[in-house]
Image (cartoon, helix red, strand yellow):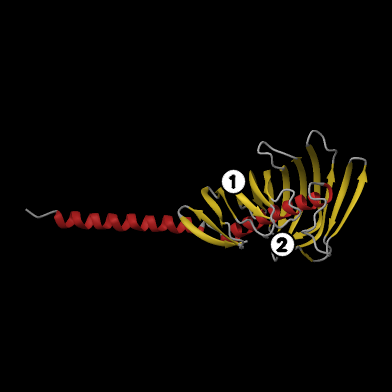
Amino acid sequence: MKSIAPKVIMLCCLFLILFTSCEDNETSNTETNYSEVDNTRAAKADNAIEGTLNIMEQAFEENEGLARSNSSSLFPECTLITIVLNGNTGVISIDFGDFCELNNGSIVSGKIVLEYGAFIGGTRTINYTFENYYYNYNGVEGGGEIFREIANQNGNPQSTVNETIVVSFPNTDVTATRVGLRVAEWVEGVGSGTWQDNVYHITGNWDTTFTNGFHRAGEVTEKLVRKLSCAYITSGVVELVQENFTGVLDFGDGTCDNEAIIAINGQEYLIFL
């Protein structure tokens, strides 16, 4: 009687080879679905929007808010701020010209316009738009509404932003449109007389759609920390859903740098903001 053991062993080996090959192909397909370019653009869009919203917050504070008597300003001489009053409402125009480096290192140009309503019951509504405006060489268009509270449940000033903002990037026709809700709580530096110690905690959720078909949904799961003295988000985590995958975007440990890490399907990628 012939032994069947060699045949069984050969079949097992063949099965293992095929199974390993399928796993390798699946891993390869997963890796090819990650686009460094698209993910970097998405992170740059988030940072440009966050940086811009903080600029608007500070411009309002220095001119019509708690920091009107500031001895230290975020805005150097290359920024022209004009105010047109109409009773208890007004318009603030922040004009950066063709190039302006703010005192926190952010590079901006163009104009931001803030139209604010009356101060009612500790709250105020501000509508914002952009005119040929750029943040760190990324174009920012669109606008939205800011609902400002002089004190939230923690006793801190807080702004809730409804946004529809389009971000464009250098050397490409691809643009990103972010639609969402963003809440910024001013947790440090309130009333200190300088912008340099201002810190904001940011929560919210937003969808970002690119003209090349890439789409990302993001929700803050660990508050984003924005120090006004830094041109970048310094820490916090955003949970992502994109390209049928889930992942997280981690902005770091609080260090002021232009790096973040995105983790998708167990793979980590370093991106530069």
For disc 2, the marked residue is 104
Q: Nearer the viewer, residue 222 or 245?
A: 222
Q: Nearer the viewer, residue 222 or 70?
A: 70
Give the percent coordinates (x, y) of residue 162. 72, 42
Amino acid marked by disc 1: Val
Q: Which mark is residue 131?
A: none
Q: Secondary structure at mark 2?
A: loop
Give the percent coordinates (x, y) of residue 20. 34, 57
Q: Nearer the viewer, residue 141 or 31?
A: 141
Identified at 93% across, 40% down, the residue is 87
Number of marks drawn: 2
Front disc: 2 or 1: 2
Is residue 176 visible in the rendered image? The answer is: no
Identified at 64% across, 47% down, the residue is 202
Q: Which mark is residue 220?
A: 1
Give the percent coordinates (x, y) of residue 61. 79, 49
CA gap between label 2 and label 1 equals 24 Å
